[in-house]
Amino acid sequence: MKKKLIQHTTKHFEKLFQKKPEHIFLSPGRINIIGEHVDYNDGFVLPAAINKYICFAISKNKSSECALVAQDLNDIYSFDLKDKLQPIEKMWVNYILGVLQQLKEKGLPEKGFSIVFSSTIPMGAGLSSSAALECGIAYAMNKIFHLKLSKEEIARIGQTAEHTFAGVNCGIMDQFAAVFGKKNNVIKLDCTTLAYEYHKANFKEYQLVLFDSCVKHTHLTSGYNDRRNEVEEGLAIIKATYPEVTSFRNCTEKMVISLKDTFGEIIFNRCLFVVQEIERVELAVRALTNGNIEQLGDLMTKTHFGLSELYEVSCPEMDFLVKEALTIPEIIGARMMGGGFGGCTINLVKKENVNAVIEKMRRAYATQYNIDLKYYKIKIATGTSEYAI
C-alpha cells in the first residue's frame, strides 16, 4: 500500500516535471485510542500515527517560483516564495502556505521547489489529513533546507498554520501524533505541557478497525465552541467551592457530584464526562501495559456512551454503529472518535473474524441508512519521515 502510493506520486511528478523527484516524504494520519475532548481540559490523550499517509515528491529549482500539485484533486497552485503569503480561497493550499509563511519568518531560503502530493488518508473521516499535510510540508522543508527545527517546533508550526490560514482553532494532538508517531506505540500526551511517553500497543489477538459513517453533521464547530464554554463555566463553579482545584485533572468525580444541583443538568453532565474521561485514559494505559485488552475495549465503549449521553457530541449514525458493533461478540470495544457529529468509530475486533465482522456491519448500516459503510483496517505506524529513494 505504502509502496503503491509512492510509485503513484513519483510517476505523476515525473510526468509533470520531466525528471525524478529529489526527495520523498511520508506523513501519516492519526487515531486517538481514548481521551476525547480532554485536550482543552488539561487531560491526557492517547493518540498514534497510522499506516495511512500523504506522500510528497519534491525537488528544488533555481528560481523562487513554487508549484504545488494536489494529485488527488487534479489541482495546481503556483506562487513566488518572495511574495508575502496570505490565505486564499482554496483550503488545501492554505494549510501549506500557513506553514511556509512561518518558515520564511524562521529563515527559510527564498528558493523555489515543486511538490506533488497524494494521499491514502480518507478526507473528512476524522483521521487528520490536514495535520499530515501541514507537518509533512514543515518536515520536508526542514530537511531540504537544513532549518534545524525540532519535532516539537514542526508540530507547533502545523497547529499555527491551521489557526491562522485555515481558521480552525485546533489543539496540538493531531500534529503531535503525526510528527512523534512511533511504530507499534501509542503516545500518552499531556496537551498542556507537551510532556509525553510511549507505551507499547500490543492488541494481541485483536485488530483496530475503523468504520466510516460517511456523514458529517454541520454543528461540529458550534457544538465544539458550546462545549468549551460549558466546561469553563463548570470549572469556575468547582474552583469557587474547592479552591484546591486548579484544573479538571485534580478534580474528582465526588466533587462534581456534590455540585450537581448548583451546576444544572447540562453543566453537570459535561463536567462529569471530562473527569471520567481523564480517569479512563490512565486506566487505558494501565490496561495496555498489563496486556488486558478486554479492559481497554470496555473503557473505549464507556467513552462512547459518555460522549453520546453526557457530552452530547454523537449523532444517530455513530450511535447506531457502536450499538450494532456491541451485538457482535468478536468486537470487544467500540466508540466514536474525534470531535463528533460524524466521522469514524474505532473498534477492537478479533483478528480471525475481521472480514466477517466488516461484512456484518456493512449489511446492517446499508439496511438502516442506505449508506455504503467504508472501513479501514489500520496498524500503528511511524511518524512523518523521509523515504530513502
Image (spheres, rainbow, N blue to C red):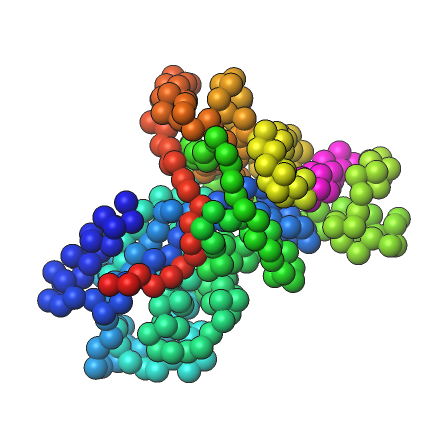
Which quadrant: the C terminus? bottom left
Residue for point 66% across, 41% down? 286
Relative to 188, is 294 above or below? above
Residue for point 88% across, 54% down? 243
Residue for point 35% across, 68% down? 140
Magenta-span inclusion, residue 9 = no
Could you say where residue 224 lies in the image, as x and y percent from the top left? Answer: 58, 46
Could you say where residue 88 lies in the image, as x and y percent from the top left? Answer: 35, 64
Could you say where residue 255 lies in the image, as x and y percent from the top left? Answer: 84, 41
Horizontal side of residue 233 vs 14, given as left or right: right
Residue for point 20% across, 66% down? 21
Horizontal side of residue 163 vs 34, given as left or right: left
Region in magenta: 264-280
- Regarding residue 60, the answer to whether it shows in the image is yes
Main SS, magenta residues: helix
Relative to 110, is 352 above or below? above
- Regarding residue 175, the answer to whether it shows in the image is no
Relative to 13, is 297 above or below? above
Which quadrant: the N terminus? top left
